[in-house]
Amino acid sequence: MRIVIALGGNALLHRGERPDADVQQANIDRVTTAIAALAHEHEVVLTHGNGPQIGLLAMESAADPALSAPYPLDLLGAQTQGMIGSLLVRSLYDTLPGHRIAALVTHTLVRADDPAFRHPTKYVGQVYPQAIARSLAHERGWRIAQDTTGWRRVVASPVPERIVETDTIHDLLNIGTLVICAGGGGVPVTADKNSGALSGVEAVIDKDLTAALLAEDLKADFLLILTDVPNIYTDYGTPGQRPVLDVTPADLRRGGFPAGSMGPKADAAARFVERTGGLAAIGALDAAYEIVHGRSGTLVRPEMPTA
């Protein structure tokens, strides 16, 4: 079975943790142990978030007096792919000795006229108290918005249209390689209408939507979205919250999940199942093997045919 796994940003950093390299490596070591169990039995493509990391690099770039202007988000996204890919490769080499593993810097095509460029919604970087967030927004020209625990920078998040390196990823899979790619949703690029030349754009693509598109293009059997909760919940965060164990895309569409947290994951899972007839699941980082084998998580399956 071919499985595309989308790791949440909390695979590397939990909320409140310092963004130190050793902290991220320790978190990745824990996650790759679960992924290795799947890689022994299935073809695996691994994607990952980069919100905390790209936010940190953006802060450093904006404060660097040696630069006449901060690095754009597309180049910072490429940097995070290299850094996180290297951390994952090292850990997976330890847990999968003798296995082919490759981390690929990946570009994702978006439309230059995507309305997301006028309405930024994607959270990047760390959480701030409101006063500090407003000060940084004024100082650096950021847009900010409130998430579940504080205030964060928001940037454009256009819809992914195509992963440029899909054919290369397919070739690597065909020779038995575990591929790490499309980190942070991929480096966002637009294509010139006449020449096809690629240009980077100031955005961060939702990694779950890119993972769903990648899984569709690779003809994957299963899309596994890993996060920091064991299931989707109805009425999450309230005394009446209840786990949802088995749903259809239509159920997810009616769920009304928050745009800043579970919403993109639910949307990605629904899209993949609707377009391919495959299976998707959402669940906890440490339970990857159990989720694929039906013992944990929320399973998203096609609608049952009516008589």
Image: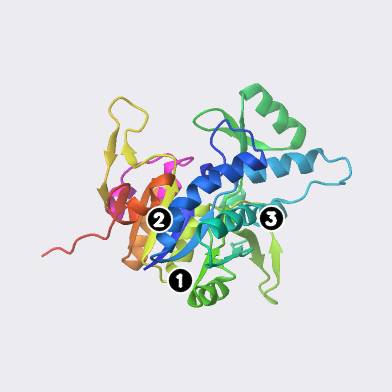
Q: Earlier in the sequence, mark 3 or mark 1?
A: 3
Give the distance between the C-alpha atoms of the residues marked 3 and 2, in whole angstroms: 26 Å
What residue appears at the point 14 percent right and 63 percent down from the top-left corner?
306
Give the distance between the C-alpha atoms of the residues marked 1 and 2, in whole angstroms: 14 Å
As drawn, 225 above or below 59:
below
Q: Does the magenta stretch include residue 251?
A: yes
Q: Which region shows up in magenta?
A: 248-265
Q: For residue 20, which quarter of the picture?
A: top right
Q: What residue type is labelled 2?
A: Leu
As drawn, 45 above or below 72:
below
Q: Position of residue 151 (x, y in %)?
A: 59, 30
Q: Residues within 10 Å of mark 3 (few under 14, many from 20)?
A: many
Q: Can residue 104 be seen in this view?
A: yes
Q: Which amino acid does label 3 sit on?
A: Asp
What residue appears at the point 57 percent right and 54 percent down from the top-left corner?
91
Q: What element carries label 1?
A: loop
Say which residue label 2 marks.
224
Q: Is residue 257 magenta?
A: yes
Residue nearest the viewer, comparing 164 with 22 = 22
Q: Where is residue 49 in the image (x, y as percent from the top left)?
A: 55, 49
Q: Which of marks 3 and 1 is in front?
A: 1
What residue appears at the point 59 percent right and 33 percent down from the top-left corner?
17
Image quadrant occupied by the C terminus: bottom left
Q: How many labels does the image show?
A: 3
Say which residue label 1 marks.
218
Image quadrant occupied by the N terminus: bottom left
Q: Where is residue 201 in the image (x, y as percent from the top left)?
A: 68, 57
Residue nearest the viewer, comparing 15 with 39 = 39
Say which residue label 3 marks.
74
Q: Which of marks 3 and 2 is in front?
A: 2
Q: Which amino acid does label 1 sit on?
A: Leu
